[in-house]
Amino acid sequence: MNQTLPLALYGASAGAAAVAALALYFRWQEAFAYRAGVALFVLLALVSIGNAYAVSAEHLSAWAVQLQGLLSAALFPTAWLYTRDLAADVPRPFVWTDVWHFAVPAVFVPQVIWAALSFSPQVEAQLAASTELPIEAQAFAWTAIILVLLWIVQVTFYSTLIARTLIALPRRLRLVFADLSGRSLAWLRIVLFLFLAHLPLAIVHNLGLIEVPEIVFASISFVLTCGWAAWTTSQQPAFQVTTESPSRISVDAVEDSSTEKYAKSLLDAERMARIAAKIETAFKSEKLHLNPNLSLSKLAAQIGISESNLSQTFSRQMDSSFYDYVNACRAAEAMDLLATTDTSVVDIGVAAGFNTRSAFYNAFKATTGTTPAAFRRQHRPQASSSQLAGIEAGQPLRPE
């Protein structure tokens, strides 16, 4: 079968990874996630080059196979360190104790050296013609099988860590931000899902149980690498306050205050009621929700109450999160404008404080059970099509 297209796809994957590594290198000092990202994309580029070599070579040496395994084994702990800092509310740089994450890749190193020293092309040719493998070749084969099993365990372990981090992230973001656009790392969940979905296919193919055309793996590599590269180069740490400043908002002090850790700092019911009243007054009189960049720290500075006390009050007194409360106020503002004015739906989303079309649509539907356009048709049946357009038509509210 002609391998030109798989080679081209692996080459494009390596090129995309190299460009992403270079882009992140220029942001090296901004966050550890970018440094981990450089290492991650260098590894992805090398894996793609290795795949291209495997496709083009007439015979793949044992050392090359083991080296490819080493590179693949280093991918997931690196991806975990990248994700850990990207989703952290305080910077999580690499420390010496993190070296243990690379235990499995380290085990591959002597296997690569063993293969390079003991299994030259001539020796491999002799082994292929032999009816019985010598003891050293058998030991090498069993060691390779053990390393594959370790690799599978490692992939499962780090995939679980990454998945748990990404699943918990939106809940933690809702404690301190009113808009999650560009922060929830949803694209990383897509990348992880696609990789894990193709993994069983790769395993059964490598075990010789099923013959899968190389174009399938080359296409998956191209989509995953190029998609990841495109997303990650514009991604800032999830809890970074602004694109201009590397500072982040910490959620340690505003996490679930019913835990034992915060038992001594719990507010009494009377004080929470006073804070709740102050919050409601501030939002009604000053319309703080109309600020598209409102965060818990900004609210704390505005009304003179600590972030931890605000978070306790939202969760325990008002049965809400900061995110849900602010967006409910914005949805209520939009409802009033939709029912009483002829302003377009898009402009109303902006006026109500929403940054993006998806945030407007989701918050409005969560509050009313219907879409903004449907709500307007119900309350202003005489509205023109231009006044209804925008949300369903896919127009952004502000630059995302």
Image (cartoon, rainbow, N blue to C red):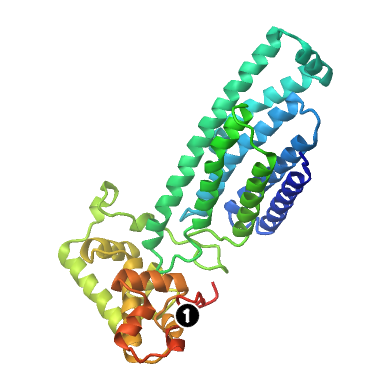
Using the image as rendered, state which of residue 22 and residue 366 is in the foreground. Answer: 366
Using the image as rendered, state which of residue 24 and residue 152 is in the foreground. Answer: 152
Give the answer, above or below, for where 192 lies relative to 171. above
Say which quarter of the image contains residue 107: top right
Quarter the N terminus occupies:
top right
Which residue is labeled 1 in the image? 390
Say which quarter of the image contains residue 315: bottom left
Would residue 92 be visible to someone looking at this image? no
Horizontal relation, residue 198 to residue 9: left or right: left
Residue 219, position as x, y percentages in the image: 66, 48
Q: Residue at x 56, y 41 (%)?
A: 198
Residue 354, position as x, y percentages in the image: 43, 76
Amino acid type assigned to the residue bearing label 1 in the image: Gly
> For the view shown, which residue lies furthest in the left direction?
270
> For the view shown, which residue lies furthest in the front direction?
1
Residue 309, position as x, y percentages in the image: 28, 63
Dot 1 alpha-carbon crowd within 10 angstroms: few under 14, some 14 to 19, many 20 or more: many
